[in-house]
Every structure is written in C-alpha cells, then in structure tokens.
Image (cartoon, grey):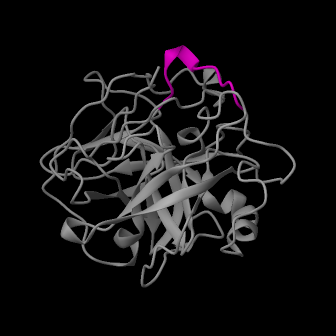
Amino acid sequence: MSITLRRCAAYMTVMTIGAFTTFFPSARAMESTTFAPDNTESNAVVATQISDRGDKDGDCTGTAITPRWVITARHCVDGYDEDGTAKPSGSIRLGQGDKQYRVGVDGWYCAPEGDIALLHTTEDMKLGSYPQLAQQVPQPGSETVTYGWSPDGSGGTTRLPMAVGQLDRYEELSLYGGKNVGVVNLKGGAKIQPGDSGSPTFVQGRLIGVSTASPGDDADGKASQLYTSPVANVYGWIAGMIASDELPQDTKQQGSGKEKIPVKTPILLGSIAVLVCVFIGGVYVIRSGRENT
C-alpha cells in the first residue's frame, strides 16, 4: 500500500536522532496478497485526502474513531495553510471494494504534543462501530496489527492490506514535543520503507498509536521496524475534542484551544519522514510520501 503525502511539515525534531530514517521525496508502489477482514478495526481505517488540493486516492491513512472524527499523523496536515487563510478541506474515503464512499473534511486539529492530529468530517461516517483508544500504553511484547492504504499497490484503492507485529520497546523521541514513541517490529518478513503516515496500530482491538516514521534502514534501504506515536499520551485531549460531533469554532486550533497550527513550515532536508511497510512474500503496509512543491 502507499499514500502520497504532500507538503508535510518538518517540525519533528529528528535532527537529534542519528539513526532516524532517511527522508525520500518519491513514492513507490506496493503489493500485497494479505488483506484485512471485515471487522471493527479494518472498517475504521480510512484514506485521507488532506485539503482539496490533495490526492483523492489518499495523502495519508487515518482511523475513524467516532461518527465525525478521524485520527491521523500531525505531519499529514501541517503545512497546508501557508498564509494562515486556507479553510480546512479534503475528504475521507471509507470502505473496501464496491462499498466505498466519501465524506468531506471541514476541520483539522493538532494534538498539544506528539505526531497526532484529528480531522473533523462534514457528516456522519455511518460505521456500525468504532475502535476504542488505548488509555494506557501497552507493555512491550504485546502483539500488534497495523493497517494502511496503498492506491498504487496490489490493493489499489479498493482492498486494505494488514500485517501483524510486536511492540518491542519505547524510545524517548521528541516528535512535536511528544514524550516517546513505540517501536513496532513487523513479522513475517515485513519491512518498512519511507511511506504513508497516520496508519493505525492496534493491540487487543484498541488503537494504540499512529505511524510516524522508521527508526532506520537496512542495507537495502528498508527496515523491519516502525515508530508509532502513542494515543495514550494525549488521550485526555482526544477525549475532550471528540466528546461532541459538532465542529469547534476555530477549525484550525491546536489541542490547547489557544494556539493555532503552525504555518509556513520549513521542510526538513527537503522532505518529511513518512512510512511504507513492505511485506515480503505478501503484505505491504504503509507507503512512501512526497512533498508537493
């Protein structure tokens, strides 16, 4: 799977991490023979078009967590409002196969810390159920499931790939002022390349984090690990935001309600770090992003 990520912000403080993944501006196509079943987890995984200028096939991946709210990575939305006047827009694509549909986006909001953001939709997404968020970070060793859309891969824009893994550890990595990130080891020969961000990782049916980047590359330019930003670290903020389905007054507020999303964002090394999980022998989970200049 893969997602084109355009004009992503570079406020992530990755310059302090020497082993952080290489930033690639180009996208790559993925393939997969393993696809998600029809359940609460997979039904909630969506493709996000960030702004009306974005790619309708998907700029990033997100997860519907209530009828009007989607969680994704903060760097997916940062940088779209360069002069502070743009109105949040775009769309969410839900479903698989011939049962897909879209809803509009009318607001986006950045968490007070960490690479996490919320999108507000123009209408009810009408899912039968929504996944629960983890209120505590899971213990290392927990089994994980990660999903991600790939419009250029074997799943195209109609089938959702998935992969299992294991939460290996937590690292103190300050992404947008966050406390830490979880490091997920992918199983079954899975490897990640630069690619789509915002993809969800679940433990025992609870959403524990959204994909942020890769801790490093192997000699082949791929890696078998991914960073996930824990939702438990900002659970209180998320719960407060999604308590109402109504659109907050300021459609571009930060989670604090006082500070707006930064604009005119510089691009670190010419590109933002994004994720792609390549599943050798079958599953490919997250795709390469690129800056739209």
Q: In the image, residue 184 lies at what x, y percent?
A: 44, 50
Q: Nearer the viewer, residue 238 or 265?
A: 265
Q: Locate residue 65: give its quadrant.
A: bottom right
Q: On the rendered structure, is 215 left or right of 179? A: left
Q: Locate residue 22: give its quadrant.
A: top left
Q: In the image, residue 231 lies at what x, y percent?
A: 62, 59
Q: Is residue 270 located in the magenta-colored stretch of the structure? A: yes
Q: On the rendered structure, is 218 left or right of 15? A: left
264 relative to 150, above or below: above
Q: How many marks?
A: 0
Can you see residue 140?
no
What segment carries the magenta color?
263-273
Q: Is residue 291 located in the magenta-colored stretch of the structure? A: no
202 relative to 166, above or below: below
Q: Locate residue 233: give its quadrant.
A: bottom right
276 relative to 117, above or below: above
Q: Who's the residue at 34% across and 45% down the image?
A: 286
Can you see residue 84?
yes
Q: Who's the residue at 45% across and 74% down the image?
A: 204
Q: On the rendered structure, is 72 left or right of 152? A: right
Q: On the rendered structure, is 89 left or right of 12? A: left
Residue extending farthest bottom: 128
The secondary structure making up most of the magenta span is: loop
Q: Who's the residue at 50% across and 24% down the image?
A: 19
Q: In the image, residue 7 lies at what x, y percent?
A: 51, 29
Q: Nearer the viewer, residue 49 or 175?
A: 49
Q: Nearer the viewer, residue 163 or 147?
A: 147
Q: In the image, residue 68 lies at what x, y percent?
A: 57, 70
Residue extending farthest top: 269
Q: Who's the residue at 16% across and 45% down the image?
A: 31
